[in-house]
Image (cartoon, rainbow, N blue to C red):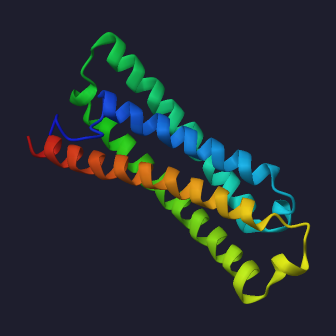
């Protein structure tokens, strides 16, 4: 299990956490600079969930940096591993819900009602970019939570 990509307390796990922070921050940045995002609650929810993901991933990246610098093995702490697993699942669920709802609104705006052609003040393509970045952040979080699940299963069976 130690050789699995994204395993906690390893360099690949740290790369996943930092990638989550970068994608979520980029998604927030693009959405916040798009005009007209605040008129739709799904876009505001996307910003809120990506903000939560940044806080969660940054906190765990900090813990992983600390563990790597001190060369400490935090895998012996079952409570910590279960806490991270549940936190990953909650954050992933919220992020996926935000990405899906925002994507649904953009499809409604662009294809079903043609609001993007009528309302030129809406930055529909920036909405799309932000949603794609948020999906990337969710994908990295899904990888982390999947690896953490298998890590906890192995640890609890030992």
Which quadrant holds residue 107? bottom right
133 on left or right of 150: right
- Residue 106, how many percent across, how many down? 70, 73
Rendered residue at 42%/25% (across/down): 63
Question: In the current view of this chain or complex, which residue is farthest to the bottom?
Answer: 112
Question: In the current view of this chain or complex, which residue is farthest to the top?
Answer: 70
The residue closer to the viewer here, 111 or 8, is 111
- Residue 76, how many percent across, how many down? 21, 28
- Residue 116 lies, with reference to residue 8, above or below; the image says below
User: Which image quadrant: the N terminus?
Assistant: top left
Question: In the current view of this chain or complex, which residue is farthest to the left?
Answer: 158
- Residue 153, how many percent across, how many down? 18, 49
- Residue 122 lies, with reference to residue 156, above or below; the image says below
The residue closer to the viewer here, 83 or 22, is 22
59 on left or right of 40: left
- Residue 125 lies, with reference to residue 85, above or below; the image says below
- Residue 74 lies, with reference to residue 19, above or below; the image says above
User: Which image quadrant: the C terminus?
Assistant: top left
Rendered residue at 86%/63% (across/down): 36
Which quadrant holds residue 71? top left
How many callouts does the rendering have? 0
- Residue 109, how many percent across, how many down? 76, 79
Rendered residue at 42%/54% (across/down): 89
């Amino acid at each position: 299990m130690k050789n699995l990509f994204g395993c906690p307390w390893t360099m690949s796990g740290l790369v996943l956490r930092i990638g989550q922070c970068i994608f979520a921050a980029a998604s927030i940045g693009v959405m916040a600079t798009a005009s007209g995002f605040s008129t739709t609650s799904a876009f505001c929810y996307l910003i809120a969930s990506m903000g939560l993901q940044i806080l969660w991933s940054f906190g765990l990246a900090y813990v992983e940096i600390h563990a790597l610098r001190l060369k400490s093995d935090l895998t012996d702490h079952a409570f910590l591993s279960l806490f991270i697993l549940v936190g990953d699942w909650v954050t992933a669920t919220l992020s996926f819900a935000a990405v899906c709802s925002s994507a649904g609104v953009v499809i409604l705006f662009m294809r079903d009602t043609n609001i993007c052609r009528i309302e030129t003040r809406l930055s529909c393509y920036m909405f799309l970019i932000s949603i794609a970045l948020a999906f990337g952040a969710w994908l990295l979080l899904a990888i982390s939570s999947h690896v953490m699940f298998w890590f906890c299963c192995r640890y609890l069976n030992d």
